[in-house]
Amino acid sequence: MERKWWKEAVVYQIYPRSFKDANGDGIGDIRGIISKLDYLKELGVDVVWLSPVYKSPNDDNGYDISDYREIMDEFGTMEDWEEMLEEMHKHGIKLVMDLVVNHTSDEHPWFVESRKSKDSPYRDYYIWRSGKDGKEPNNWESAFSGSAWEYDETTGEYYLHLFSKKQPDLNWENPKVRQEVYEMMKFWLDKGVDGFRMDVINMISKVPGLPDGEPQEGKKYASGSKYFMNGPRVHEFLQEMNREVLSKYDIMTVGETPGVTPAEGILYTDPDRHELNMVFQFEHVGLDSGSGGKWDIKPWSLADLKKTMTKWQKELEGKGWNSLYLNNHDQPRAVSRFGDDGKYRVESAKMLGTFLHMMQGTPYIYQGEELGMTNVRFPSIEDYRDIETLNMYKERVGEYGEDPQQVLEKIYYKGRDNARTPMQWDDSEHAGFTTGTPWIQVNPNYKEINAKAALEDPNSVFHYYRKLIQLRKKHDIIVYGTYDLILEDDPYIYAYTRTLGDEKLVVITNFSGKTPVFLLPEEITYTTKELLISNYEVSEEEDLREIRLQSWEARVYKIR
Ligand code: NOJ
């Protein structure tokens, strides 16, 4: 397998609005990030993926961009950004920027021009259609509730927005749009950025004719996803982008691709196809969603988690490359979702880190994950900020008449604001995030869970993550070894091996508060064993063939 720096790297995602506020306006900013680079250096990460910092009216916190070449006022200036990049590079950290080009803001000059008249040279930068029988052009639902179409009085047509109505979709069929995007990418690459995370990049090609989707039970609008996810020209567009831009730089690329299967994942990431380095798949974070989508919440099962992760590990092996994540700014906190955020918060956070970092692929850490930050339960919908959550609440409570408390329970479990409460730096007011009033409240558990306390405690989740990252630098097998699931049917234990040459890793993780017995399969033999990491004290003499595990225990052995 070909060695690549981005395979060996660990990525840390910063959601700038919630990371660190340096000027006291309650909103995280670039100078705040600069002030925390020593912290990231100590953690040991190699790359920062920075969620959007471009000019934006913030309908979707920066994922609605009104100028791709300017920095958002709240976050600072281009000079600040340049200083940040320089400081990151001095700290040995690379910078991956977010590329949001499925849509722009409706305040982007292209859209402002586009909506003025049907003859505007920018009309065809977006997807305009006339209505059908006095209704929207088709029945697609927006990811943020309601129709994916917005009527515009000026010209009497509708425009498509797969996300909020302030996020009109760009028309990638138009070669001028593609050239604009490529030029903009070069603008940032020439400033020295080290790669892109590409927002919903598998949605840029829509099926011609934009056919109606399948109606959804109990809902006004239909899911059109099969007509815009992995559409007919997406690979052609990405290959063009690769040819014209990506191939000219030594960078890393990761595509956000909801709804991809491993077969499609390979199409995006097979190096011979010259598209992307890796994709974010969504199957494992969809295990607690029913057929009604994200808010149709059902319990996830360990058996399904094993099946899903193993499928991705095995099917991409030698063909593509996995990204490894449990958290990001759109997902609830993993320790609340897959672990125990009460009594065993620390143990289960470490277990989840072990489970993920020992797989094949590039691991991503989302800010606060290294502290074991948890979900939040704000008492009122007024305390929430996320457009997805607010629109969903309005639709369900206001239009469908659902019980407000029940809808709040869904938000407590799945809402994106769980990930967006401010980073907990210390136990001072607002967790040291800001001296002002934070744009969203901090999680009340910050007195106990914060970076200062974690740095001082050698047994903290932070120091455990540090060790996970260091291990990756020392042991090639963690990056390049092949994965195999063992103990497939065990209801509590997720265990697997990694193999490289005559070495093996045995990764043992207990996904429960119970104390099950781990039995090493007989066909795995060894003459020497070394414990690489564990989240409880383990005696060197202990037999690896049979282990009574403690609650949420994790261990990794290297054997020969
Ligand atoms: C995916 C991003 O991660 C999410 O935060 C955003 O709302 C949508 N794409 C739309 O840009």
Image (cartoon, grey):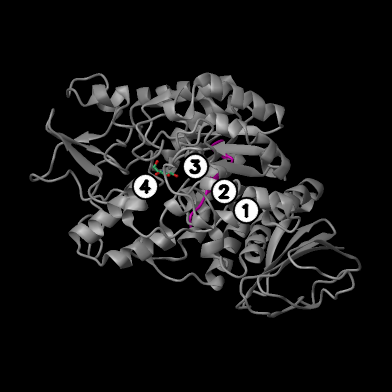
What's the distance in space between the residues labelled 2 and 4, CA to CA?
A: 18 Å
First in residue order: circle 1 vs circle 4: 1
Q: Is residue 84 left or right of residue 104?
A: right
Q: Is mark 3 within 8 Å of ligand 1?
A: no
Q: Badge 2 is on which residue? A: 424
Front disc: 3 or 2: 2
Question: Is the residue marked by circle 4 packed among few (<14), some (14-19), or many (20+) residues within 10 Å?
Answer: some
What's the distance in space between the residues labelled 3 and 4, CA to CA?
A: 12 Å
Q: Badge 4 is on which residue? A: 385
Q: Which residues are magenta?
A: 273-283
What's the distance in space between the residues labelled 2 and 1, CA to CA?
A: 8 Å
Q: What kind of residue is marked 3?
A: Ser
Q: Is residue 218 left or right of residue 295?
A: left
- Residue found farthest to the left: 134
The quarter holding residue 378 reads bottom left
Q: Secondary structure at mark 1?
A: helix
Q: Badge 3 is on which residue? A: 18
